[in-house]
Image (cartoon, coloured by chain):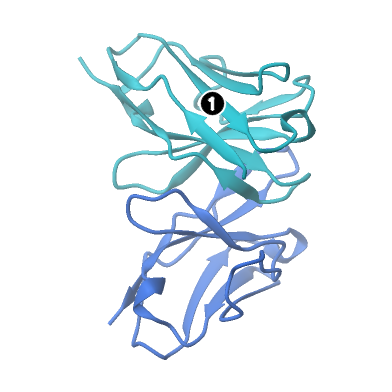
Chain colours: A blue, B cyan
Amino acid sequence: SYVLTQPPSVSVAPGQTATITCGVKNIGSKSVHWYQQRPGQAPVVVVHDDSDRPSGIPERFSGSNSGDTATLTISRVAAGDEADYYCQVWQTSDRAVFGGGTKLAVL
Amino acid sequence: EVQLVESGGGLVRPGGSLILPCTASGFTFSSYSMAWVRQAPGKGLEWVANIEQDGTRKYYLDSVEGRFTISRDNTKNLLYLQMNSLRGEDTALYYCARVAYSYGPFDSWGQGTLVTVSS
């Protein structure tokens, strides 16, 4: 089965940069989408197609994708960024897959 | 404003059935593929099924194929998930989601409806 691997948790101090990875062999050949999910809320897209930001998402959110790893980077992290983050791709079989999720803690 | 509102959740016994409707508004429903995504309590997101704009092609998570059926009524702006032979591991919050474009992100989500499978 196709498994996207994310670290379970990432911790960062306010004002610093958080890096969340999503890995599988040759993920660079796919478009990766990233979601933020705050407690009790539905997910929200923060980055789509590797590195594009929807309107309304701060420039502090950025993405990259190459080789076997896609990365979500959040610069100047603030308390409001505390949430679970998920990567997602579409398989060639037209089935979607999510990563296991990463809990971002702002210390 | 795009809105997706799920309903139909509840407590059901193992082996039972449930149908989840999702009412869409604020966009041209027939122009978008739609999907169901679930989240078990305290767990991550899991894609369940999606259906193309005209309803002709449907795709399912292996563990639900043959038990769940996704469908849509473009005349009523409704998406459905028929769930049969329910199991404990199907207990989750079920989200209805819009697919922005082919192989695009799920760009709009409902608030979810909770399905609990328990005796």
Tell which of A72 and B10 is nearer to you: B10
| Residue of label 1 | B22
Q: Compared with residue B39, is residue B119 higher up or lower down, i.e. above or below?
A: above
How far across and how far down the image is residue B83, in percent?
47, 16
- Number of callouts in the render? 1
Q: Quadrant of residue B35?
A: top right
How far across and how far down the image is residue A16, in percent?
42, 90
Residue found 56% across the figure and 81% down from its top: A60
Q: Compared with residue B111, is residue A99 higher up or lower down, i.e. above or below?
A: below
Residue found 65% across the figure and 38% down from its top: B26
Residue found 59% across the figure and 46% down from its top: B108
How far across and how far down the image is residue A1, in percent?
57, 43
Q: Going by the image, does A49 lie left or right of B110?
A: right
Residue B78 in sight in this render? yes
Q: Going by the image, does B77 lie left or right of A58?
A: right
Subunit ID for the residue under disc 1: B
Mark 1 closeness class: few <14, some 14–19, many ≥20 residues within 10 Å: many
Tell which of A24 and B17 is nearer to you: B17
Q: Going by the image, does B79 lie left or right of A65?
A: left
Q: Quadrant of residue B91?
A: top left
